[in-house]
Amino acid sequence: MAGVVRIFTRRLTTSPSAYSTGSNAAVAGHGGGGVKLWKRLSFFVAFPAVGLCMLNCYLMHQKESHERPPFVPYEHLRIRNKRFPWGDGQKTLFHNPHRNALPDGYEDEH
């Protein structure tokens, strides 16, 4: 046990260069073209791929219908045991009258 503690304290008190065993590849200049490669990959592959994904999401969103589902008064949904502390007590904090139904149905009929 004392030997393990001695090794850890020796590593903490000596500088890293005292027990390093070889030259560092980053300092030696090995692989100097890596930065150019990753920069080109980022600009010519990654950014266009993100742009194509954004375009795909936008076009798929435009094709969807934006009609809300019909209101079905299930007993287990929209249970209000306690009133909300804001407004009339029935609407949630981020209530959307077009998307969120109250216990008795939608507020507005479009």
Image: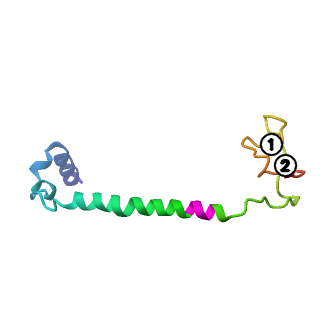
With 5 as the anchor, is 87 left or right in this view?
A: right
Q: Give the answer, above or below, for where 95 lies relative to 75.
A: above
Residue, disc 2: 102
Magenta span contains residue 19: no
Q: Amino acid at mark 1?
A: Lys
> What is the x, y in percent for residue 53?
50, 63
Q: CA distance from mark 1 to mark 2?
A: 7 Å
Q: Residue drawn at (85%, 46%), measured in percent from left and top?
A: 81
Q: Amino acid at mark 2?
A: Leu
Q: Which mark is residue 91?
A: 1
> What is the x, y in percent for residue 7?
18, 52
Q: Are marks 1 and 2 in contact (CB under 8 Å)?
A: yes
Magenta span contains residue 58: yes
Nearest the eye: 99 or 83: 99
Q: Residue drawn at (86%, 58%), measured in percent from left and top?
A: 71
Q: Which residues are magenta?
A: 57-61
